[in-house]
Image (tube, rainbow, N blue to C red):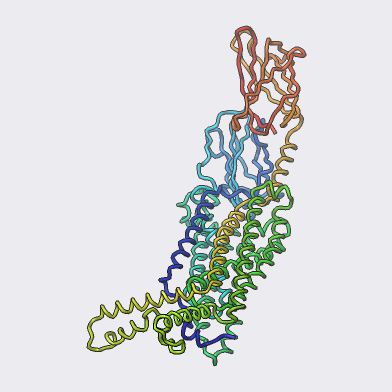
C-alpha cells in the first residue's frame, strides 16, 4: 500500500522533471550517438534489392533475329507495376524504337510494341518497374536485328532505389518506424502501466515527438516515392504530376491513409494529455474510467490502422499466404511498439522524473514479456514465410540479416531479464511506493544522522535540521528571498532572480541525490538504457530487412532464371566468326561449338570453311577464353586437327558463369595470321 506523506512532501504529483539534471545530457548524447551510428549503417547500405527478377524475354538476351519483331516481351518472377515508358527500346543510334505504351500480356509478362521499318543492328532494352512489394526493379539487355553492330545507346547514371534519393528514402523509412514505436508504445505505457505519466512533461514530449517524426517521415516518403522508383533525381520530389501518379499506386494510397490516421492520432494525444490528466479528482473517478476505456479502444483502432499501412504495401502483401501474413505483420508491429516504445517511455521516466512507481515498472515488465512471446510467435511465422529453407537462411542477404536480428533479440531479452530482477528487488523493498520515495527516505535518514553527529541533537529533534540540510539550504534561501521579493518597497529584482536561480539549482541537486540514493533504481536505469541502445540497432536491422529481397523469392527467382536460360539453349553453344588474314586465300569463316556450353568441363569443336562453304585446311588454329569482369584468363586451348577443316579439344574448363570473350587465332600461311574476338555468355 502506498504511503502518501512522503510522496506529498518529496515527490511532485505532476511528476514534472527539471531539465538541469546531470544524467539527462549524458542520456541524450548516448541516444544521439546510437542514432548517428544507425544512420551511418543505413547510408552505407546498398540500394534496395529488387524483389522481382526478369526471368525471360522475347527476343532473348543477346539473340540475333532475321527481322524486327512486332513487340518486345518481358517476363518477371512476379507481378510488377508498369507505366507507359517503363520499358524503352533504343536503336543503335540511341533513339527510341518503341511506341511508348506497355501492355500486360498475362502470366507476369509485359510487352511494348516496336515501330515499323527499324534498321539492322544492336538494340538496347531498358526497363524500370516496381515490384508488388513496392521496391524498384531496373535493368537492361540487348538483342540484334540482322547482325550485331556498335551502339550509341546510353543509360542514365541515376538508378531507381539508389543514390542520394535512396539514402534519404531509407532514412525516412527508419524514422517512420521509430516514430510509430514511440507514439504507440509511449501512449500504451501511459495508458496501461503508468496513468499518472500522462501529466509528466518529458513523457508527453516523447510521445509528441514520436507523432511529429512519424508524420514528417511519412510526408518525406510520399514526396520521395516518385524519384525513388523513377528517375532517381531529388528535384523530381516536387513534381506534382509525378506525385499524382504515386497517389494512384498501392504504396501512395497506404501513405495517404497513414496521414489520415495520424490526424486521428493527434486527437487521441490531445485528449490523453489534456482532458485525461485533468480528471484527477476523486469525484471524477467514474468519468476517468470511462475516458480510459474510450481512449484504449480508440487508440487500439488507430494503432492497428497505422500498422496496417505497412502490412498492405510491403512484404506481407505479396507471396504465399498474404491473407494470413498481413494480420500477423500488424500484430508483430504492435508487439514491437508496445515493447520498445514502452521501453523508451520507461527510460525517460527513470532518467527525467522522480515519481514512477514500482507498480508501473512491474506492470510494464509483464507487458514486455507478453510482447516478446507475441514477437517470437509472429517472427517465427514470418521467417518461415520469407526464407523457406535453410539454404536461404545462410546463403541470402535476407537470411543473414534475419540471423543478426534474431541474435539482437536474444541479447535484448537477456538484458530485459536483468531489468526484471532489478524490478523485483525494488518491489520487494519498497512495496507499492515509488522507488524515489524509498530513496528519499534514505537521503533523509543520512541527513539526520549527519545532523546528529554535527550538533549532538537527539534524533527526535533533528527533523528541522534534516529538512534544512536535505534541501541544501533551499528553505533558508526561500526565507531570505521572500522578504525582498515580496516586499512592495524592494527594487532589488536582480537579487531576487539570483536567489530564485539558487533555489532551483538546490532543488535540482536534491532531486538528483534522491534518484541516485537507491542502488536498485540505478541498476534498473543502466539495464533499461542498455535495452534502449540495443533496440535502436535492432530497429536499423529491421528497416534493412524491409528493403531486402526475401530469401524465398530470391531463390525462386534464381531457379526461374536458370530454368529459362536452360530452356533457351538448344544444344551446344555455337558461334560463327568471319576472318581475313590479308594474304592470298586468307578469307573464310570459323565456327565454334562448345558442348554443353556451361561451367565445368566442355568439348570444343572448331570448323574452318572457305567463303564458298568448302572445308578449309589451314596450318594452325588456337582459341582462348577470358572473363574480364573477374580477371580470369586468357585460358589458352590448342585444339587437335582430326579431319579436313575440323579441330577438337576435350575437357575445356569454364570455371564460372559470365560474359566470356573468346579469341580465335587463325594462321593461313607462314606469315598471314589474324585473331578475331567474340563475346558470349557461358553458364
Q: Is residue 146 above or below residue 497?
A: above
Q: Quadrant of the C terminus?
A: top right
**Residue 259 point in image, percent of width and height:** 53, 67
Q: Nearer the viewer, residue 188 or 650?
A: 188
Q: Quadrant of the N terminus?
A: bottom right
Q: Nearer the viewer, residue 250 or 37?
A: 37
In the picture, residue 487 is in which quadrant? Answer: bottom left
**Residue 316 point in image, percent of width and height:** 67, 59
What residue is shown at x 49% (from left), y 74% (from top)?
515
Q: Nearer the viewer, residue 320 or 244?
A: 320
Q: Is residue 432 above or below residue 512?
A: below
The number of callouts visible is 0
Q: Is residue 12 above or below residue 387?
A: below
**Residue 374 point in image, percent of width and height:** 68, 67
What residue is shown at x 60% (from left), y 71% (from top)?
422
Can residue 307 be seen in this snapshot? Answer: no
Q: Nearer the viewer, residue 477 or 574?
A: 477
Left-right relation of 171 to 417 = left
Left-right relation of 479 to 89 = left
**Residue 159 point in image, percent of width and height:** 53, 45
Q: Residue furthest front?
A: 456
Q: Is residue 484 above or below residue 396?
A: below
In the picture, residue 265 is in which quadrant? Answer: bottom right
What residue is shown at x 54% (from left), y 74% (from top)?
264
Left-right relation of 392 to 244 = right
What residue is shown at x 61% (from left), y 12% (from top)?
673
Can residue 493 be seen in this snapshot? Answer: yes
Amino acid at each position: 500500500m502506498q504511503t502518501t506523506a512522503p510522496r506529498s512532501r518529496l515527490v511532485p504529483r505532476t511528476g514534472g522533471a527539471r531539465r538541469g539534471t546531470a544524467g539527462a545530457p549524458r542520456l541524450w548524447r548516448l541516444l544521439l550517438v546510437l542514432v548517428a551510428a544507425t544512420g551511418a549503417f543505413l547510408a552505407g547500405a546498398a540500394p534496395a534489392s529488387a524483389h522481382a527478377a526478369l526471368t525471360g524475354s522475347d527476343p532473348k538476351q543477346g539473340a540475333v533475329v532475321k527481322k524486327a519483331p512486332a513487340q518486345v516481351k518481358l517476363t518477371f518472377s512476379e507481378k510488377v507495376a508498369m507505366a507507359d515508358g517503363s520499358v524503352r527500346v533504343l536503336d543503335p543510334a540511341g533513339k527510341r524504337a518503341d511506341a511508348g505504351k506497355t501492355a500486360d500480356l498475362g502470366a507476369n509478362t509485359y510487352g511494348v510494341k516496336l515501330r515499323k521499318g527499324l534498321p539492322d543492328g544492336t538494340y538496347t532494352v531498358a526497363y524500370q518497374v516496381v515490384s508488388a512489394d513496392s521496391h524498384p526493379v531496373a535493368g537492361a539487355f540487348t538483342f540484334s536485328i540482322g547482325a550485331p553492330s556498335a551502339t550509341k545507346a546510353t543509360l542514365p547514371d541515376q538508378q531507381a532505389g539508389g543514390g542520394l534519393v535512396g539514402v534519404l528514402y531509407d532514412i525516412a523509412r527508419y524514422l517512420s518506424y521509430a516514430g510509430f514505436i514511440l507514439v504507440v508504445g509511449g501512449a500504451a505505457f501511459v495508458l496501461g502501466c503508468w496513468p499518472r505519466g500522462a501529466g509528466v512533461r518529458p513523457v508527453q514530449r516523447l510521445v509528441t515527438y514520436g507523432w511529429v517524426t512519424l508524420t514528417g517521415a511519412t510526408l518525406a516518403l510520399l514526396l520521395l516515392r516518385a524519384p525513388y522508383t523513377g528517375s532517381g533525381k531529388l528535384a523530381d520530389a516536387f513534381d506534382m504530376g509525378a506525385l499524382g501518379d504515386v497517389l494512384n499506386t498501392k504504396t501512395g494510397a497506404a501513405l495517404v491513409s497513414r496521414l489520415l490516421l495520424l490526424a486521428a492520432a493527434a486527437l487521441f494525444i490531445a485528449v490523453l494529455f489534456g482532458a485525461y490528466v485533468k480528471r484527477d479528482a476523486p469525484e471524477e473517478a467514474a468519468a476517468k474510467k470511462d475516458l480510459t476505456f474510450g481512449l484504449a479502444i480508440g487508440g487500439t483502432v488507430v494503432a492497428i490502422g497505422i500498422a496496417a499501412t505497412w502490412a498492405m504495401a510491403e512484404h506481407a502483401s505479396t507471396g504465399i499466404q498474404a491473407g494470413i501474413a498481413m494480420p500477423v505483420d500488424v500484430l508483430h508491429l504492435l508487439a514491437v511498439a508496445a515493447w520498445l516504445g514502452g521501453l523508451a517511455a520507461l527510460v525517460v521516466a527513470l532518467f527525467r522524473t522522480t515519481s514512477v512507481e514500482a507498480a508501473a515498472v512491474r506492470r510494464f515488465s509483464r507487458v514486455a514479456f507478453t510482447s516478446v512471446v507475441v514477437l517470437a510467435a509472429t517472427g517465427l511465422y514470418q521467417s518461415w514465410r520469407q526464407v523457406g529453407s535453410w539454404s536461404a537462411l545462410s546463403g541470402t542477404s535476407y537470411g543473414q540479416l534475419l540471423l543478426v536480428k534474431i541474435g539482437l533479440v536474444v541479447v535484448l531479452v537477456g538484458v530485459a531479464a536483468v531489468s526484471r530482477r532489478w524490478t523485483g528487488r525494488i518491489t520487494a523493498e519498497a512495496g507499492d511506493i515509488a522507488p524515489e520515495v524509498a530513496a528519499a527516505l534514505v537521503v533523509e535518514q543520512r541527513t539526520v544522522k549527519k545532523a546528529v553527529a554535527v550538533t549532538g541533537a537527539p534524533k527526535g529533534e533533528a527533523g528541522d535540521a534534516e529538512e534544512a540540510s536535505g534541501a541544501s539550504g533551499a528553505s533558508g534561501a526561500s526565507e531570505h528571498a521572500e522578504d525582498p521579493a515580496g516586499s512592495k518597497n524592494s527594487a532589488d529584482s536582480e537579487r531576487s532572480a539570483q536567489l530564485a536561480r539558487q533555489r532551483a539549482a538546490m532543488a535540482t541537486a536534491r532531486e538528483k541525490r534522491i534518484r541516485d540514493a537507491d542502488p536498485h533504481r540505478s541498476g534498473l536505469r543502466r539495464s533499461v538504457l542498455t535495452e534502449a541502445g540495443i533496440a535502436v540497432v535492432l530497429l536499423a536491422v529491421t528497416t534493412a530487412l524491409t528493403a531486402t529481397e526475401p530469401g524465398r523469392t530470391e531463390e525462386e527467382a534464381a531457379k526461374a532464371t536458370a530454368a529459362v536460360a536452360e530452356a533457351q539453349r538448344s544444344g551446344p553453344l555455337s558461334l560463327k566468326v568471319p576472318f581475313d588474314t590479308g594474304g592470298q586465300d586468307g578469307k573464310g569463316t570459323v565456327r565454334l561449338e562448345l558442348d554443353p556450353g556451361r561451367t565445368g568441363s566442355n568439348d570444343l569443336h572448331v570448323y574452318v570453311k572457305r567463303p564458298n562453304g568448302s572445308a578449309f585446311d589451314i596450318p594452325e588454329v588456337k582459341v582462348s577464353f577470358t572473363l574480364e569482369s573477374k580477371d580470369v584468363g586468357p585460358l589458352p586451348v590448342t585444339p587437335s586437327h582430326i579431319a579436313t577443316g575440323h579441330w577438337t579439344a576435350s575437357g575445356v574448363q569454364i570455371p564460372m558463369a559470365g560474359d566470356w570473350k573468346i579469341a580465335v587465332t587463325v594462321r593461313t600461311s607462314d606469315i598471314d595470321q589474324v585473331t578475331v574476338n567474340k563475346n558470349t555468355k557461358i553458364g
